[in-house]
Image (tube, rainbow, N blue to C red):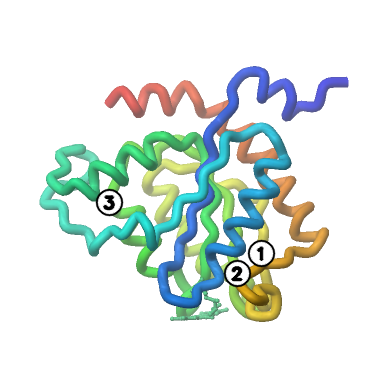
Amino acid sequence: MTALSDREDFLHRPRLHVLVASTRPGRAGPPIAEWVAEHARTFGHFEVDVIDLLEVGLPFLDEPEHPSERRYTQPHTKEWSATVDAADAFVFVTPEYNFGINAALKNALDYLYHEWQYKPVGFVSYGNSSAGLRAVQMTKQVVTTLKMVPVTEGVPIHHVGELVVDGRFTGSEALAGAAGRMFSELLRVANALEPLRVEARAQ
Ligand SMILES: Cc1cc2nc3c(=O)[nH]c(=O)nc-3n(C[C@H](O)[C@H](O)[C@H](O)COP(=O)(O)O)c2cc1C
């Protein structure tokens, strides 16, 4: 029997951006994102890119107009717009700072509007005992305003400090299983929302 994910892949092979949300020196984000990207590639139904907000290098929002107008004045905004436009789905690899969303991620979200719309997002969150889940809840409020669709399935990583050693993240079987369930749901939702993304890109 053909798996549901195989049938959906037949319809479309979506582009998944694995977004590294943290930017500080010594951050845990990149090794976790590499682990996520490796599993997403093994999953086999996405084109996978890792997008690192440190490399994107956005200053604090410096556009005069609301992003829904798409009248961008800065080269970095135009580049960021093209990057986000290219994605069909996202995984945000996100820390929790002071029980909430980290500033670099909020700023990157605020820069754009149409480019985020009708794209599913899954969360790989990390922290101490909270596993970053308070940041995820806060981020869901923001992304739904941008008409993104957060999927329920996610990968919550507890006590991240113990799992990133010498710049490498080692995820358990349980976390790998959770990632697989998140990819399946992202694929299903990304394909279902495709007609709406086509419309939004034309605006
Ligand atoms: C400014 C700051 C605030 C933090 N606040 C929290 C927090 O609210 N909850 C938590 O579980 N961990 C918190 N931590 C610890 C982080 O979970 C841990 O340092 C993690 O590695 C941060 O992600 P990053 O390394 O990618 O920056 C905080 C760390 C920083 C730097």
Name which of mark 2 and mark 3 comes first in the sequence: 3
Which x, y percent locates residue 67? 22, 44
Residue hosting label 2? 126
In the rendered image, the residue lying farthest to the front is 166
Instruction: Tell me what residue is drawn at x 54 percent, y 40 percent.
Output: 16
Which x, y percent locates residue 135? 51, 67
Residue hosting label 1? 156
Q: Is mark 2 within 8 Å of ligand 1?
A: yes
Instruction: Tell me what residue is drawn at x 61 percent, y 71 percent.
Output: 167
Instruction: Tell me what residue is drawn at x 24 percent, y 42 percent.
Output: 78
Name which of mark 1 and mark 2 comes first in the sequence: 2
Which x, y percent locates residue 187? 63, 34
Looking at the rendered structure, the secondary structure element under dot 2 is strand
Q: Is residue 76 left or right of residue 43?
A: left
Query: Are the residues flagged by discs 3 and 1 in contact, CB closer than 8 Å?
Result: no
Q: Is mark 3 within 8 Å of ligand 1?
A: no
Residue type of the residue flagged with mark 1:
Pro
Q: Is residue 119 left or right of residue 64?
A: right
Which x, y percent locates residue 33? 58, 57
Q: Name the image quarter holding the C terminus.
A: top left
Q: Of the numbered discs in the image, which one, if any, rests on residue 111?
A: 3
